[in-house]
Image: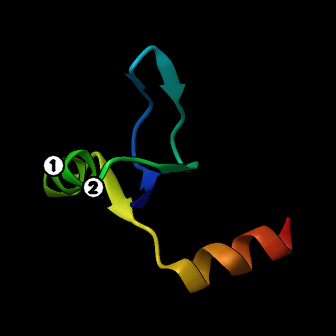
Amino acid sequence: MQVKMNVQTMYHGDLLRKDKIYEIEEDVAKRWIASKIAEIVNKDAHAEELKDN
């Protein structure tokens, strides 16, 4: 599941930066979304973001 980070955090030894999009395991992503650490990424919005960059 793709999520956009609301905060900077370490996960499995990797630094995940705020406002970046990452592919995360679904169960972890659901916990992060529930605790407002991250938000789910709309696949269409992500495609637009990549196109703009």
Residue occupying image coordinates x 52% and y 23%: 15
> Does residue 36 sit above or below 43 in this rendering?
above
Q: Position of residue 12 (x, y in %)?
A: 39, 20
Q: Position of residue 36 (x, y in %)?
A: 23, 52
Q: Is residue 14 left or right of residue 29?
A: right
| Residue picked out by circle 1 | 31
| Residue picked out by circle 2 | 26
| Amino acid at the residue labelled 1 | Arg
Q: In front here: 28 or 19?
A: 28
Q: Earlier in the sequence, mark 1 or mark 2?
A: 2
Q: Position of residue 38 (x, y in %)?
A: 34, 52
Characterize the local packing of mark 2: few (<14), some (14-19) or many (20 or more) Cα atoms within 10 angstroms: few
Q: In front here: 32 or 24?
A: 24
Residue 11 occupies which quadrant of the picture? top left
CB-based contact (under 8 Å), mark 1 and mark 2: no
Q: Nearer the viewer, mark 1 or mark 2?
A: 2
| 3D distance between C-alphas at marks 1 and 2 | 9 Å
Furthest-bottom residue in this view = 44
> Does residue 11 sit above or below 26 in this rendering?
above
Residue 53 occupies which quadrant of the picture? bottom right
Residue 44 occupies which quadrant of the picture? bottom right
